[in-house]
Amino acid sequence: MKNTCKKIVTDLTRDKDIDKNLPLYLKLLARRYNAYATVKVSMNFYVLKEIITEQADQNSDIHIYFEKLSDILNKYIINRKAIDESVIEAIDALRSQVERKMKNLTAYTDGYELYEYVLNRMEGTIKNDTEDVDTEQLSAQMFQFVFSDKDTVVINSKLQLLLAQLPVRMTKNKFFDIVTNTLSIYKGGEVSAVDDFCDMLRATVLIQKPDGFETEYPKLYSVYDALCKADYKEMTEKTYDELTDKLSDAALFINQEASAYMLMQEVINDIYTLLLTDVDSYDENQSQTGYKQAVQILEACIESDDMEQLPEQLMTQFMSIEGIQEDIYESVVILEAVFDDIKTGKEAQIVSMELSSVVDKLSLVSKLLSTSLFINLHEEQTVAAEIADNTYIMKLRDKMTEELNSLFTGKDRRVVRSMMSKLLSSMPIFMNSQQEIKDYFDYVLQSCQDAGELTACSRLIKAIMEDA
């Protein structure tokens, strides 16, 4: 199969027999996409079913979504019901629902991290567990840790890890100067890029919350609300323990829920792929190694009520498709490598041969099978990118400053510092030399007079350096 793929790609790039090879190429790409997604989804669907059956709440949204997926697989892939626009709309809607869930879980993760930062730095004082920190030695260790690598990307990554834990000792004006300088980097670039960056910053400190934030997960919102309203200045040990317990339980729930939805989205993307490519691929793929076994695995998973009812031979079928996914993917890579060039370079032939709808469908599949599980499938491509000039950057700077000022107003200084820390660790490094970085380490550590905060920072930073 790989040789066949290479030959047709070579012929197309040499403009050989376009009328014959272009339709063949698109059919072959659809077949390989279909086979790849079938084998992949058979394994992931099994794991997802295992996760779902272990969850106690059978009426949860994740169970409802799983039942919808099972129904789609059973009707359209196993029992070969004709695929129409209604099922495409159904799978697309299901994908959007899972994406909404993940956006809310991500937002809660960001929100909880803000207050975890605060609670971590209060623990030493509340629990009477502080230690003397040699700030000069710690600063030297951090500097050595960061610059033990020569790779700029690694250095920046290490710096951002440390910035997320360091005490924040700067005025609001200094902080806003850093935001301004960061936005200036985007001057002359695309407006969409700087807008995306600002949206990321807004989401990081929950200036911008996703739809359903207060209603999608009532228990998570209750914990978040308690963290927001807590009196950190007069906090007792009892209140501290209650909040940390709530935060720990909520974080565990988020990890479990997010893991399940991440896998579910991958399964949805694969089933979506099958629905888009099935009509032209099913008959041809029947003879392909591992395809029938993958379909049989899916059928067994759908027919069984729980994991204990799955037939014993299922493990044998799993063994029979071992390595098949990787083998198919090699041919997908060969075909996909020229797909964008064919779309643009052979556009006239695609239109004249009435293949535009096929190309559009395969472009959608290419997104579905990409490494970005939550990629926007229906984003419109603009012909010309709008450029962010100085006027645009300054207006955006003023808007961000106003939003952050409003966010900080009325907040406990510990919470404001946490927000600043999270934002700083999300921005490009604002220091320009090794000496400036060393001076910053020295300054923030020596300026921190809170023994509990300094103890927490020291312990967290040392843990980061030891685990790296």
Image (cartoon, helix red, strand yellow):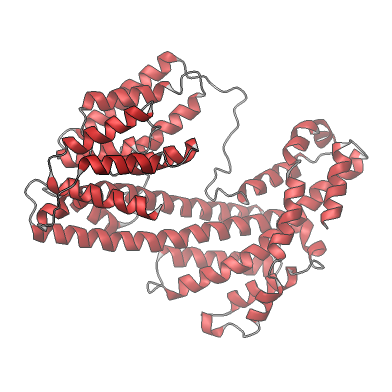
| Residue 137 shown left or right of residue 193 in the figure | left
Q: Which quadrant of the structure image shows residue 169? A: top left
| Residue 457 shown left or right of residue 382 in the figure | left
Residue 334 in sight in this render = yes
| Residue under the image location 86 percent in, 47 percent down | 8
| Residue under the image location 41 percent in, 20 percent down | 184
Residue 331 image offset from top left, x and y in percent: 76, 54
Residue 22 in sight in this render = no
Q: How many marks?
A: 0
432 or 78, which is in the foreground?
432
Residue 74 image offset from top left, x and y in percent: 63, 69
| Residue under the image location 41 percent in, 38 percent down | 147
| Residue 356 shown left or right of residue 187 in the figure | right
Residue 260 vs 305, above or below: the answer is above
Residue 78 image offset from top left, x and y in percent: 68, 70
The N terminus lies in quadrant: bottom right
Most extreme residue toward the right, as rendered? Answer: 17
Most extreme residue toward the top, as rendered? Answer: 391
Residue 454 image offset from top left, x and y in percent: 18, 45
